[in-house]
Image (tube, coloured by chain):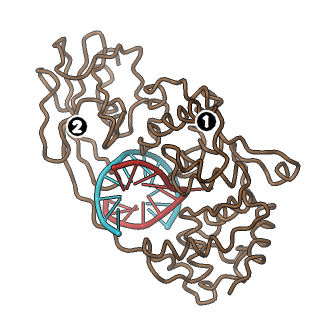
Chain colours: A brown, B cyan, C red
DNA sequence: TATCCGTGGAT
DNA sequence: TATCCAAGGAT
């Protein structure tokens, strides 16, 4: 069986030389000199990074920290402002839970994040991964961090042939056995960096991998096939209508979506149901078809017919927002795609 | 345990 | 073009 100390030493030496610079990170050298990561920034980055790439997160992280530099500031923010700032990043329950979590820290924990895995796990939006990640990266505790990268590295290092998600407990056990007591924060980031840059899903760069001599799958020549995964069901296609109503003065009809469900808590244009249900138009008008939007969500494809009208009628749902206050960037992507089809000169464009 | 929940980049 | 996939959590 692979010696944990060997793997730890190889990974940390690699990380010391090749770690990527990220705005929420403390470099190995700074950490060795006594620097500590800001738990707020570590937590915020980890929530943003859930199922999301570093490249997609960077600008959002900068905007959030510029506007809300600490957890107290975020806790005091308006819900709609936070949701608008999150728009485009996806998985909007993360933004709702982000606010719940910040307020819980502010009111129940004296404004400081819990410094243990168990304490962190009690917070909204913080699950096993994020709790371990914040505990190890921000507080340098020897917790086992298991994300998709770590699963892949473990599956290859130990040639785990069982497909995910069934293999998860085995992979976690391997990861736990390798977790070091020294430099656990740097180690956690090292494994994830390795998975993100070297031990990639396709075409892993084994030639430059610090663990190539330890890798069982590599020795067997099956590294590119691991981890195996059970086949996912095909995405069905759904259809719907998006109504974009404008007043002659340019105001735009928007509504806040229900807190739970798809795009929960986000602002958007009124829509019909997308699953066969048929909500009526938000007001009577001479609706004009301007095109269709195709958008793929996690578990279905959507084809959306885009209708527009200029009217002074009173809406039965939604609220007209003055054009000066309307920001397409505050909408989820599917809504912004619909807006992009509205002729620019229709009114106030 | 299985399903729901976004988005954009890579291939 | 279609599919896969990413530093997952809630229910």
Mark 1–mark 2 contact, CB under 8 Å?
A: no
Residue C9 is situated, as x and y percent measured from the top left of the image, at 47, 51
- Tag 2, which secondary structure? strand
The answer to whether residue A62 is left or right of residue A237 is right
Point 79% across, 63% down: residue: A182
Measure the alpha-carbon separation of dots 1 and 2: 51 Å
Q: Residues within 10 Å of mark 2 (few under 14, many from 20)?
A: few
Point 72% across, 47% down: residue: A25
Quadrant containing the C terminus of chain A in the rendered view: top left
Residue A51 is situated, as x and y percent measured from the top left of the image, at 49, 54
Q: Is residue A170 above or below residue C6?
A: below
The residue labelled by disc 2 is: A291
Query: Which chain hosts label 2?
Result: A
Point 66% across, 61% down: residue: A143
Q: Is residue A349 above or below residue A131?
A: above
Q: Residues within 10 Å of mark 1 (few under 14, many from 20)?
A: few
Q: Nearer the viewer, residue A334 or A80?
A: A80
The residue labelled by disc 1 is: A109
């Amino acid at each position: 069986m692979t010696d944990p100390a060997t793997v730890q030493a190889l990974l940390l030496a690699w990380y010391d030389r090749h770690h990527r610079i990220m705005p929420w990170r403390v470099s190995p050298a700074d950490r060795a000199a006594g620097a500590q990561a800001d738990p707020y920034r570590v937590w915020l980055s980890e929530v943003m990074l859930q199922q999301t790439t570093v490249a997609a997160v960077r600008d959002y992280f900068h905007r959030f920290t510029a506007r809300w530099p600490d957890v107290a500031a975020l806790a005091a923010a308006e819900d709609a402002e936070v949701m608008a700032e999150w728009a485009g990043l996806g998985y909007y329950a993360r933004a709702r839970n982000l606010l719940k979590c910040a307020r819980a820290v502010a009111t129940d924990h004296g404004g400081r994040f819990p410094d243990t895995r168990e304490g962190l796990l009690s917070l909204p939006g913080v699950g096993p991964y994020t709790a371990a990640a914040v505990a190890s990266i921000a507080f340098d505790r020897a917790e086992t961090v298991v994300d998709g990268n770590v699963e892949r590295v473990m599956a290859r290092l130990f040639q785990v042939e069982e497909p995910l998600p069934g293999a998860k407990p085995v992979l976690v056990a391997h990861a736990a056995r390798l977790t070091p007591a020294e430099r656990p924060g740097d180690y956690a980031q090292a494994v994830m960096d390795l998975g993100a840059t070297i031990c990639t899903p396709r075409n892993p760069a084994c030639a430059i991998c610090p663990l190539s001599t330890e890798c069982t799958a590599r020795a067997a020549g099956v590294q590119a096939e691991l981890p195996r995964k059970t086949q996912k069901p095909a995405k069905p296609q759904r259809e719907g209508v998006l109504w974009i109503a404008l007043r002659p003065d340019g105001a735009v009809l928007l509504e806040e979506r229900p807190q739970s469900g798809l795009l929960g808590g986000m602002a958007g244009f009124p829509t019909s149901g997308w699953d066969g249900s048929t909500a009526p138009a938000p007001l009577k008008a001479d609706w004009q078809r301007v095109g269709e939007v195709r958008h793929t969500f996690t578990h279905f494809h959507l084809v959306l017919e885009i209708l527009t009208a200029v009217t002074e009628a009173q809406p039965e749902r939604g609220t007209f927002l003055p054009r000066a206050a309307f920001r397409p960037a505050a909408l989820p992507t599917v809504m912004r795609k619909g807006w992009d089809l509205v002729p620019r000169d229709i009114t106030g464009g």
